Image (cartoon, rainbow, N blue to C red):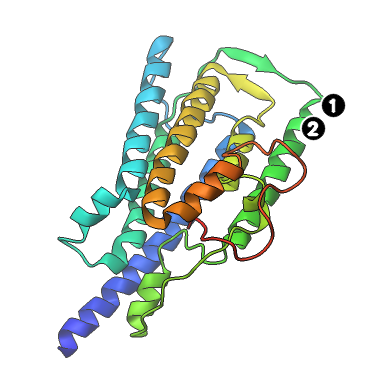
């Protein structure tokens, strides 16, 4: 028992470090990619349409991995071979590696679709900064947000069972149902210089975000039932159509996590 406990403790520490390092570094790399525009870390010598086909394949690879591993069906299969409390960390690690591979192998097209010159380009930069601020606001509004899957591991290490948290619709969630996705979309389209590969990136990843939001909502309806259906019928998905919040302040319902 002592040997088994020590082995499990070491495994949890390794997962914690890998999830934090790989998950965090991949997000920073993505932020740099979105801010700077397309950059080419590894040149594969491609030209013309091959660049776009390759970049599209990289995007689809990430979409399948990222969206597939978060679905409840995958979680059920995962828990047959590994404990449930490590799923979040494993998901963060695999997603971090996949995203770093995509960004490292992404090929830049020499074709410039459009360029916004100064001083108008500063509007795009300001939009990016606003999106970062909104993203942080959305994460703070969730309170129970655990992007690297570390909380279940910490609870396991401390021998603590955390009761299910009832999250309310607060902060930006009173204006849109998926403010984090809204901010990501704003970051995606806030680059003042767009090459052909970056336009492909913007279109594919925008479509993926919209599809992912709809898939996520199916899970949320199954989990929260009428509460989420009522929320969905009241608050828009991604675009806040009015300045006034569409959902009242206070613990009226559960939130997404």
Q: Which residue is mark 2?
A: 122
Residue 241, x across and y down, in percent: 70, 35
Asked if marks 1 and 2 touch (Cβ < 8 Å), the reply is yes
**Where is residue 104 drawn, in percent x and y?**
43, 36
> Is residue 41 in sight in this rendering?
no
Q: Nearer the viewer, residue 48 or 256?
A: 256
Residue 221 drawn at (x, y percent): 41, 49
* Mark linked to residue 43: none
Decide: is 154 above or below 110: below
Image vertical order of residue 9 relative to residue 144, above or below: below
Residue at image coords 36%, 72%: 153
Left/right of residue 157 with respect to residue 236 in the rendered view: left
Identify the residue at the far right of this view.
119
In this rendering, the count of numbered labels is 2
> In the picture, residue 12 is in which quadrant?
bottom left
Residue 107 visible: yes
Q: Splitting the image into 4 quarters, where does residue 189 fall? A: top right
Circle 1 Cα neighbour tier, 10 Å, few/some/many (<14 / 14–19 / ≥20): few
Quarter of the figure that contains the N terminus: bottom left
Residue at coordinates 33% horizontally, 69% vertically from top-left?
14
Viewer-nearest residue: 235 or 38: 235
Q: Is residue 95 above or below residue 6?
A: above
> Residue at coordinates 73% horizontally, 31% vertically from top-left?
124
Q: CA distance from mark 1 to mark 2?
A: 6 Å
Q: Residue at x 40, y 78 (%)?
A: 162
Does 33 sit above or below residue 171?
A: above
In this rendering, would 121 be left or right of 237?
Answer: right
Q: Residues within 10 Å of mark 2 (few under 14, many from 20)?
A: some
Q: Which residue is mark 1?
A: 119
> Residue 253's image quarter?
bottom right
Instruction: Name the secondary structure under disc 2.
Output: helix
Dot 1 falls on a residue whose secondary structure is loop
């Amino acid at each position: 028992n002592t040997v088994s406990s020590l082995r499990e403790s070491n495994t949890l520490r390794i997962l914690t470090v890998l999830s934090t390092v790989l998950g965090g570094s991949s997000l920073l790399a993505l932020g740099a990619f979105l801010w700077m525009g397309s950059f080419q870390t590894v040149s594969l010598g491609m030209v013309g349409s091959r660049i776009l086909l390759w970049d599209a394949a990289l995007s689809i690879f990430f979409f399948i991995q990222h969206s597939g591993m978060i679905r409840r069906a995958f979680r059920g299969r995962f828990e047959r071979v590994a404990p449930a409390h490590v799923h979040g960390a494993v998901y963060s690690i695999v997603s971090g590696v996949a995203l770093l591979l995509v960004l490292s192998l992404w090929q830049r097209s020499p074709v410039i679709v459009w360029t916004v010159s100064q001083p108008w380009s500063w509007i795009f930069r300001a939009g990016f900064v606003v999106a970062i601020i909104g993203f942080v606001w959305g994460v703070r509004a969730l309170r129970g947000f655990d992007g690297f899957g570390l909380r279940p591991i910490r609870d396991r290490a401390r021998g603590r069972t955390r009761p299910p948290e009832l999250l309310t619709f607060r902060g930006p969630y009173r204006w849109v149902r998926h403010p984090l996705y809204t901010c990501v979309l704003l970051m995606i389209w806030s680059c003042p210089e767009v090459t052909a590969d970056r336009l492909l990136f913007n279109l594919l990843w925008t479509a993926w975000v919209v599809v992912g939001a709809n898939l996520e909502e199916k899970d949320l309806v199954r989990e929260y039932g009428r509460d989420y259906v009522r929320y969905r019928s009241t608050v828009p998905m991604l675009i806040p159509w009015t300045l006034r919040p569409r959902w009242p302040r206070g613990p009226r319902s559960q939130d997404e996590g």
